[in-house]
Image: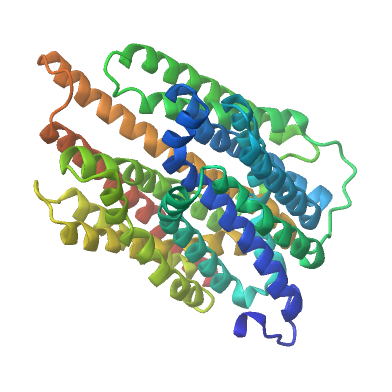
Amino acid sequence: MELFSDQPGDEGLPGAERRLAMIAVMTATTMAVFDGTIVNVALPQITRALDAPVGTAIWVANGYLLATAMTLATFASLSGRIGFRTLFSAGLAVFTLASLGCALAPSMNMLIFMRVLQGFGGAAMLSIAPAIHRTIFPNRLLGRILGMNAVLIATSTAVGPALGGTLLAALSWEWLFAINVPLGLVAIYLSLRAIPGKRSATRAPFDVAGALLSAVSMGAMIMAADACAQLAHHGQEGEAALTAGAYALVSVAAGIGFVKVQRRVREPLLPLDIFASARFSLAALTSLVSFVGQGIAFVALPFLFQNAYGYTAFESALLFTPWPIGIVLVAPHAGRLADRHSPALLSTAGLALFTVGLGLLALLPAQAQAWDICWRALVCGMGFGFFQSPNNREMLGNVSRERSGNASGVLAIMRTFGQCLGAAVLGIILSVYAAAALSHGEVHMSALEDAAAIRLALWVAVGATALASLVSFSRIRKARVVGA
């Protein structure tokens, strides 16, 4: 297989070690993605088994996301100081032990605590996984391996709910976490054996202020998005709006403080000089705006399928499956093409197709058939798959190998921030429609009102991805100017 063949002048690891390191990273990535999707299916059973309120059980999912988001930048920075092998293996060990703790948790509070620990371990792995690929593979294969990584994440996302449902049907909820233990042990062994352990020689003190401000900014942003999601709940609009506004202000203030700190410390948590590359900065901005559109669609479509069209939760999950299937079909080819042709051009073409797919979903008829939904979702997945691999290659390929850990962290932050902003936008739109229904004496929105709100949200997503396409297109012109 070409991924593991050696050629004169290749950077990275020899083929045999490259294979072992790739297996370790992809196993860990699969575990982390599964744990972000599987648990939602099990929340009702976990709530009953641990005799806990539904409101508390939500933190089984939110605690993991919050801990991950708050520490992405910190772990990306630490990777240069302690080395990829040490950080990745330690994160994997924490994740695996926390998974065992989740399986053995006797109470809801203990389960939430273990999920937070899982989030820390997941952040240590996910923040540097693309950078490890950059380190172990030569540049000529970077697009290809990033395409495979996109396929892995899409497949894990698609299979997660079905696998969770199958395990719950045959076994108890504890096995959703226990299954990580043997996989984690294998991945730890492989990572210690094959992932490079090189670290920077800096002796400057760690940027503690930057780490704290980054955690506060990202954490408050997640909480603001969660509060926005509550805006549509009848009777909670005023309180949720105030809460969301307060968290948003804290997030912005901490973000401004973070940038100021990065400009003056000797060894910043996130070196701002990586944004000196216009192609890197535009790729990061493209990623952020595109994930806003994806975030809106991911949260909005289940509302459309279930509330407006009357499909069950299981049927809704099946209707969504063509999206990740589209990514699986296209991403590997897009990654290979990105190694030979302009990643900016490929990304722009993918975003254009993604925009068309979202527009097709927004134009769904009032009584849409399953096949009509599926082919439109497939177009979205194919467009996003054609965009993601080349864009990630553009980000990682336009920084030095020494900065690849920081670039990997930026990539993860753009994805998280974009998806959360998309969820917040949807919450605001649903809140406006819910308030209008209440003013007309309706306790809940009708199916027609639900459909109208979701279609508006999907058109907003179309606008976001169209804007991302324009930003991406500007990279093509810039690349031509540089080439000239």
Compared with residue 1, is residue 187 higher up or lower down, i.e. above or below? above
Query: Considering the image in quadrants, where does the N terminus appear?
Result: bottom right
Left or right: where does residue 291 sit relative to residue 483? left
Identify the residue shown where x is 26% and y is 17%: 234
Which residue is depicted at the point 55% across and 73% down?
144
Name the residue: 74% across, 87% down: 8
**Total label count?**
0
Q: In this view, does 4 lie above or below 22?
A: below
- At which x and y percent is residue 155? 45, 62
Percent from the top left, x then y, of residue 340? 51, 79
Q: Inspect this view and state whether residue 2 appears.
A: yes
| Residue closer to the observer: 267 or 212 | 212
In the depicted structure, whether residue 380 falls above or below residue 255: below
Q: Position of residue 172 (x, y in %)?
A: 51, 44
**Residue furthest to the front:** 170
Residue 347 found in image quarter? bottom left
Query: Which quarter of the figure has residue 369?
Result: bottom left
* Residue 255 seen anywhere in this rendered image of the structure: no
Colour treatment of the image = rainbow
> Looking at the picture, how far across and down is residue 433, in whole percent?
20, 26
In this rendering, would 215 be left or right of 354? Answer: right
Along the viewing direction, whichever of 229 and 211 lies nearer the viewer: 229
